[in-house]
Image (cartoon, rainbow, N blue to C red):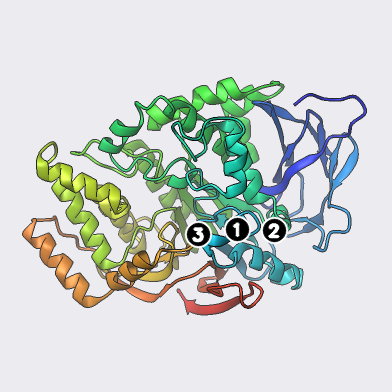
Amino acid sequence: MPQSAGIRPLLLLGPLLRHVDPVSATIWVEVDRPCEVEVLGRRVRSFGVAGHHYALVVIEDLEPGTSTPYEVLLDGDVVWPQRHSAFPPSRIRTTGREGAFRLAFGSCRYATPSSADIRDGIPPDALNAYARQMAETPEDTWPDALVLLGDQVYADEITPATRSWMATRRDLSQPPGEQAADFEEYSRLYAESWGDPEVRWLLSTLPSSMIFDDHEMIDDWNTSAAWRAQVTPETWWDERISGGLVSYWVYQHLGNLSPAELADSPVWQKMQGQADAEPMLREMAISADGDPEAIRWSYVRHWGPARLVMVDSRAGRVLDEQRRQILDDREFDWVESELSGAVRDGVEHLLIGTSLPWLLPHAVHDIERWNETLNKRHHGRPLGRLAEKLRQAADLEHWAAFGHSFERMGAALVSLARGERGRAPATALLLSGDVHHAYAAELVRPGGLSTRVHQLTVSPLHNQAPHAIEIGFRIGWSRWARAITRGIGRLARVPGTELAWEKQAGPFFGNEIGELVLQGRDARFLLFAGARAEDDGGHLRKVLDMPLS
């Protein structure tokens, strides 16, 4: 973007308050030209990526448990808060305050209400409604953090306005068609998703932690080796995956890192002072797509009595049909080490973020285990090819479809819940999304667990489940469906499991957002849902208040 003399820089997107701990915070912005960005007296120079300009301001020497309003200045001019804003001032609220720690979470937010096609009939946006209701309540009732568990943008489901814009720059009849093709198109998706006033204020005030899922890259991303063999040779793939991963690094992953991690990041350090970091980020992205060990997308958040271990369950998969793993061994070793470290540190509530649910409705779990068994046993033969077609058509690619990884996660959780790694935490909570409904399930076998292990799934924030999917997930929890799928599994000699779980609440459908309330060793799960149609102004109602500890 050319810079004109005398024209003041503009704030295009943000600010986003990202990593916050007791003494530091990071704030991310996108601007329209190179400039100096200032927050609370800390000044940084913007960096460029493919003609776009960003900055990440690291603010240190804050006081624990404080609330500090802030402004954003570009080249000395205040650009945030916006004039005549109806929202309270944006502020940095460091951890360390007395009282309960509140965490909001959810996943799957398609565009914004104003940009989505009205003909799709998507119900009101839960994140927008949550922002409005939060702005109307006292600050001491606000949540302390926000966790977004995948599909922050939909690269393969675009809005009418984006479709028209894409048509001005390329022929949409040619692959990849009406989907994001490169970094430029991804940048528009983020602007479309994060640009509405409600969510913009929310993200400027709540520290956010994020992880990707498939739609940020492409539907069925890394489902199987067969899927990769079909997709990756396509002439458009390198541009698509590099655009997706570079944009994810810039818009989401960069803010997941603490100041110490930024200081240790070779990629971040190498970017400083570069007019265009796109070539080096593209090289990183292509390397990461081909080698899961090239970069770790998983990370950790420390929140006093709670700790979040965010797990990448998409990019680091091992897809060899004979040794499928949702995380490679190196990544899983890291996860187990972080879980053990949290126990040693005396964490009361261990949170595991994974975009894909670990515990599914029983019948769905059984079908995914059955499908993986057929694929492995009959790989390369007609029955195996048929099973692979079913896997891709029905999205059978959650933790259950990676049996070894499912059991390894179970073994790790059982070990810490039995106190084998130190004093057992009160809860171990797996936070997930993806499946376009909400439910709570609890691990009930094996016995001897001092920690209560729950699967808490909340999805979507702004989308909807097709009616057939809704029926399928309702049936998936039923006893008769479970009996049928278990029988099918026995006929196919599917390996058994010692793990057993029970549904505690749900399923709930519609647009929803969840909350955890953690205090001492007590924990509660709250679920807020919007109406199924635009008939009440998009207000949320509490549909669940469930003790977890």
User: Residue 347 — which label?
Assistant: 3
In the rendered image, residue 513, in percent from the top left (x then y), is placed at: 55, 66
Q: Residues within 10 Å of mark 2 (few under 14, many from 20)?
A: many
Q: Secondary structure at mark 3?
A: loop
The answer to the question of whether label 1 and label 2 lie on touching residues, with beta carbons closer than 8 A, is yes
Q: Does residue 257 appear in this view? A: no
Residue type (three-letter) at the residue carrying disc 2: Leu
State the image quarter where residue 270 is shown. top right
Residue 246 to residue 63: above or below? above
Residue 321 to residue 546: above or below? above
In the rendered image, residue 158, in percent from the top left (x then y), is placed at: 53, 47
Q: What is the spatial separation of the Cα atoms under label 1 and label 2, in whole angstroms?
A: 9 Å
Residue 211 to residue 239: above or below? below
Residue type (three-letter) at the residue carrying disc 3: Val
Q: Does residue 198 appear in this view? A: yes
Q: Secondary structure at mark 1?
A: strand
In the rendered image, residue 54, in percent from the top left (x then y), is placed at: 71, 34
Residue that badge 2 annotates: 202
Residue type (three-letter) at the residue carrying disc 1: Leu
Residue that badge 1 annotates: 146
Which residue is located at x 44 percent, y 25 percent? 287
State the image quarter where residue 60 is shown. top right
Q: Secondary structure at mark 2?
A: helix
User: Residue 251 — which label?
Assistant: none
